[in-house]
Image (cartoon, rainbow, N blue to C red):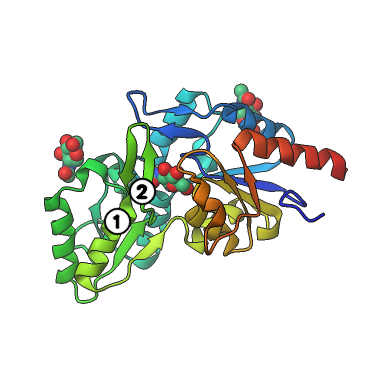
Amino acid sequence: MASWTSGVRAVLLDVSGVLYDSGGPTGGTAIPGSIEAISRIRQVGLKLRFCTNESQATRAQFVRKLQKFGFNISEDEVTAPGPAARRLMLEQGLRPHLLVHDDLLPEFDSIDKSDPNCVVIGDAAENFSYQNVNRAFQVLLGLEKPVLISLGKGRYYKETDGLMLDVGAYMKALEYACDITAEVVGKPAKNFFLSALAELGVQPHEAVMVGDDVVNDIGGAQSCGIRGVLVRTGKYRPSDESHPEVKADGYVDNLAQAVDILLASRTTDQ
Ligand SMILES: *[C@@H]1O[C@H](CO)[C@@H](O)[C@H](O)[C@H]1NC(C)=O
Ligand SMILES: *[C@@H]1O[C@H](CO)[C@@H](O)[C@H](O)[C@H]1NC(C)=O
Ligand SMILES: *[C@@H]1O[C@H](CO)[C@@H](O)[C@H](O)[C@H]1NC(C)=O
């Protein structure tokens, strides 16, 4: 039987909603079984990459937070939109005006920001003031050819105290006001998933993506030939299983169950 487990050599993991739920005074809590699930993936020698849309903090801060929750994870195992955007700036000679969270600013320390020729928007959270969003709008309209680069395009995400507007909602506001289309760096952009695979040295058909976002994680992965498994944690809602456009290759209660199924299939395959 062809299943989502056959021939898997690498596991790509979404972080928020799969490893932990964010929010609250400690910044979040680990989802039960997920810390052990990571160790088990490592023990059997599967390749592992964390693919996050997190753009509220630098990769280093993000990894430190996860380590504090008990996860065995290092910075060079994380694919995040901030570093991807920084690479793009360098490759294309772009000088950004940044509409991002204060904590993400250090990611762009080494980039020339004088006389901006593009705007970079991330999940700025409380830094999405009218003043800051309007300033980004003014910079865009002042450019001969406005370039807007968005660190992901999520609509909303879940924190312990409720659903929160994500960067996609603000990206759309700027697209509408300036009559432009943003370039998305991060999920669900194909390049984002493909660069994670390149770092692991595996082909799309050898990888599986586990996420809680049916469109951005599952649909995004599937669009480049990676299988997608939806977890029923994080922002998952039962209606995601009858999504009109995206059908996951598998559905599991949580990451621990995904790893149970994956490891069981390896024993029977061999
Ligand atoms: C953490 O992961 C690394 C890399 O796979 C491994 O070498 C190390 O033994 C792990 N540490 C723990 C405490 O499991
Ligand atoms: C971003 O938000 C923090 C916390 O509310 C605030 O202290 C800081 O001044 C803001 N920065 C900008 C550039 O708006
Ligand atoms: C990122 O996307 C995941 C789904 O992939 C979602 O659960 C999570 O809350 C999002 N986090 C942020 C900070 O946007």
What amino acid does circle 1 point to?
Ala
Identity of the residue drawn at 77% across and 52% down: 7
Mark 2 and 1 residues: CB-CB less than 8 Å, in contact?
A: yes
Q: Which residue lies furthest to the left in this view?
A: 131
Q: In which quarter of the image is the C terminus?
A: top right
Earlier in the chain: of badge 2 and badge 1, it is: 2
Give the residue number, with chain letter if any, for mark 1.
169
Identity of the residue drawn at 45% across and 43% down: 235
Is label 1 in a helix, a strand or a loop? helix
Q: Position of residue 77 (x, y in %)?
A: 54, 41
Q: Tag on residue 72?
A: none
Identity of the residue drawn at 33% across and 37% down: 162
Q: Quadrant of the N terminus?
A: bottom right
User: What is the CA distance from the residue labelled 2 to the residue labelled 1?
Assistant: 8 Å
What amino acid does circle 2 point to?
Tyr
Q: Where is residue 149 in the image (x, y as percent from the top left)?
A: 33, 62
